[in-house]
Amino acid sequence: MLPLLAATYFMVSGGPYGLEDIVGFGGYTFALLLLLFLPFFWSFPTALMLGELAAAIPDEGGFYAWVRRAMGPFWGFQEAWLSLAASVFDMAVYPTTFVLYLGHLAPPLVAGHRALALELIVVAASVIWNLYGASAVGGGSIKLWLIAVSPYFVLIGCAVYMGLRGVHNAYGGHASMAPPANRDFATAFLVAMWNYMGWDNATTIAHEVENPQRDYPRVMLTAAVMVMLTYLTPIAAVAWAGLPAGLFFSTGAWVDAGRIFAGAGLAVAIVVAGSLDAFGTFTNLTLSYTRLPHALAEDGFLPAAFTKRLKNGAPWVAILACATCWALALGLTFERLITIDLLLWGMSIVLEFLALIILRRREPTLVRPFRIPGPNWVPIVLGVCPTLLIAVALYLARDETAAHMSALAFAVLVAAAGIPLYGLAWLRKRRFAREPVSVPES
């Protein structure tokens, strides 16, 4: 259970890194209220849905297998396509974050083309780690998580101490709770949603988990609580210490807070931990996303080469192919990567809730080691909450742009590309199914 919990935690969060913009754009009060209440409408309904489906259908490919079983191969393919398309934007974030945090420690190290070289090193190291198998990634993630969050215990302790001693008055006192001058609540809301998404990624490795029926429901709900506390506690502590939100909070601002509270030593520790967090998240998401091409290949939608595994179970062809695509995407400069990622992932999560509802009606006798309490209309209510939040995200992103068009239009075009791709994959599957199999003579 612990390796799966660590992997899930990294796939969703990894630590409070990436929260800075929520405070910088919305202020402490808005950030704390948002991070406190958003999980009850976004994270917990999703965790309950994933707990039931992962325990009932612990198949390779996770959510792809659920949607395919409930709605047929076409929608199963669309589910996999949405997730893989979102991964292009999602996976570009973490090597960039790695470089941003490292730049606080040694700016010359990330100057010019060195930044891209470091991002490629992150990708290559992740590939090597994943080739050792799911158990190696999960077990190593426990140690990596302890290292990544440890500086924040020191940061929280220093912030609480400064608040109790009244030192916060030197930084503005309780006036720091006021919204910053350049507030942008819409951007803060989208960043918060992005920081609370990715719960379904851990389900693609269900076939490699020893006791998925028991562990997935526990892991999903435990991780949801852990992530919420991870986000709320350091922000509340820094707000108590009185650091002005508008002056100190942008990407990498935790480093500045550590330097103010405890000097260069804590700042360096946060830089190292932030870099390790980005690497850990990238590695665990590699573990998740690479199981999708393998599952598609087993269903005949991709070449059989993608079904090849090492002795430890690692789908090495899928790992190398996905990593190559992500490495090529590092040079792309899309505006609002987070927005595109959120929109595509949001579409996939709606399909997963539909799969839950359909399977409840179509397969009432399916063994469900964990079942969402209540009658069959409860999953519908749970699914409405994330769907409405996705609709809100679409509205808030109406003015965002990507590739010289609106972010919404761009996301819709990417999603719609799954339709012709399915047609090509179906024709390929049908052609190879018709080819006669040659039997060697005895």
Image (spheres, helix red, strand yellow):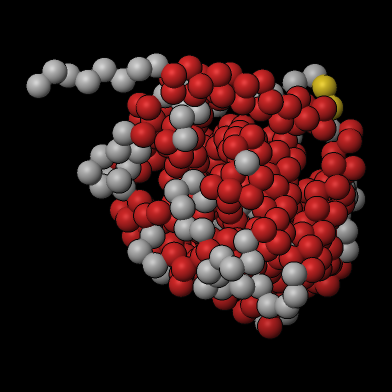
Q: Nearer the viewer, residue 77 or 201?
A: 77
Percent from the top left, x then y, of residue 137?
A: 36, 52
Q: Residue at the spot x=70%, y=47% of the render?
A: 351
From the top left corner, tell me how far across and down residue 170 is, in percent. Answer: 75, 68
Q: Could you tell me residue 213's position as x and y percent?
A: 46, 68
Q: Is residue 278 left or right of residue 29?
A: left
The residue at the point 55 percent across, 70 percent down is 368
Position of 122 relative to 22 (above/below): above
Q: Is residue 106 visible?
A: no
Quarter where residue 104 is shown: top right
Instruction: Check the image and report above or below for 439 versus 383.
Output: above
Quadrant that contains the C terminus: top left
- Left or right? Give the position of 162 relative to 155: right
Left of 192 or right of it: where is 426?
left
In the image, what residue occupies the spot 70% across and 56% down? Answer: 358
Task: Give percent across and percent down for residue 431.
Answer: 48, 17
Is residue 68 in view from this perspective?
yes
Which quadrant of the figure contains the N terminus? bottom left
Q: Is 350 placed left or right of 138 in the picture?
A: right
